[in-house]
Image (tube, rainbow, N blue to C red):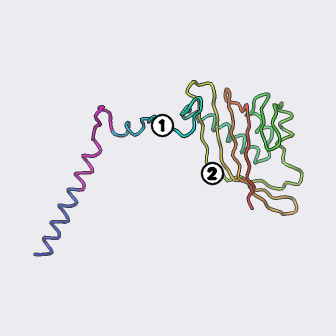
């Protein structure tokens, strides 16, 4: 008898759990929209710092992300002609110790791996494309770890973040941040 009671309790408990799961998915909010829409509502925040345009960005173009990643992949494969086709005719470069606008020819010299470089590989960690709410600025940010090997076999690695300003599908600004790994 105790075994039958336990089985009935198990069946009734399962039915209650299933019923509560099913009714929760169709719940409406007071505003009449579904509960997932309420989760995407932006709440006004009182941030500890102020800027001119808080919460100013929306998700941007996948094509911009594709172009930025394709350029990096071509560079990794030592195909500079392919890499440079994703850049505008003049590019603002901001590297550690260098900040200036350069032509594609000058950019080629800046980004060409050194003669002592045998191999470079990249392990992508993340990326995001954003566009300003007024649609005047588009950026792609990529996070990756770069592994290098010199001709004498010495290996090194660095974490890199590239902030890439896009205009008409072309890279207009390349702003790079590096952290050497030990």
**Residue 7 picture location, percent across and down:** 17, 69
> Which labelled disc corresponds to residue 45?
1
Mark 2 and mark 1 in contact? Answer it, CB < 8 Å: no
- Compared across the picture, whether 172 is left or right of 16 comes to right
| Of marks 2 and 1, the one in the foreground | 1
The percent position of residue 87, horizontal first and vertical second, equals 75, 33
Few, some or many C-alpha atoms within 10 Å of disc 2 (few <14, some 14-19, many ≥20)? few
Tell me where residue 25 appears, x and y as whole percent. 29, 44
On residue 25, which mark appears?
none
> For residue 155, what is the image quadrant?
bottom right
At mark 2, the secondary structure is strand
Q: Residue furthest front?
A: 48
Does the magenta portion include 19? yes
CA separation, marks 2 and 1? 29 Å
Q: Is residue 128 magenta?
A: no
Q: Residue at x 83, y 32 (%)?
A: 102
> Does 106 appear above or below 159?
above
Horizontally, is 135 left or right of 67 in the view?
A: left
| 154 relative to 44, above or below | below
Q: Residue, x 38% and y 36% (percent of image)?
A: 37
The x and y percentages for residue 57 are 56, 33
Residue 125, labelled with which disc? 2
Q: Is residue 26 left or right of residue 125?
A: left
In the image as oriented, which residue stretches furthest toward the left? 1
Please state, as top left, top right, bottom left or bottom right, where the N terminus lies in the image. bottom left
Examine the rendered structure and indicate whether residue 122 appears above or below residue 65.
below
Tell me where the magenta segment starts and ends, as one range. 17-34
Element type at marker 1?
A: loop
Depth order, front residue of 43/155:
43
Residue at x-position 81% and y-position 36%:
99
């Amino acid at each position: 008898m105790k075994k039958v009671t336990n089985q009935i309790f198990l069946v009734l408990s399962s039915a209650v759990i299933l019923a509560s799961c099913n009714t929760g998915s169709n719940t409406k909010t007071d505003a009449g929209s579904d509960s997932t829409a309420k989760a995407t509502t932006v709440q006004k925040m009182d941030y500890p710092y102020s800027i001119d345009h808080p919460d100013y960005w929306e998700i941007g173009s996948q094509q911009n992300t594709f172009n930025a990643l394709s350029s990096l992949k071509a560079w990794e494969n030592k195909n500079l002609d392919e890499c440079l086709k994703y850049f505008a005719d003049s590019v603002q470069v901001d590297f550690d110790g260098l900040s200036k606008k350069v032509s594609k020819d000058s950019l080629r010299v800046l980004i060409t791996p050194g003669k002592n470089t045998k191999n470079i590989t990249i392990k992508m960690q993340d990326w995001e494309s954003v566009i300003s709410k007024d649609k005047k600025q588009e950026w792609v940010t990529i996070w990756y770890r770069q592994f290098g090997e010199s001709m004498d076999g010495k290996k090194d690695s660095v974490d890199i973040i590239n902030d890439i300003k896009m205009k008409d599908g072309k890279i207009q600004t390349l702003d790079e941040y590096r952290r050497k790994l030990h």
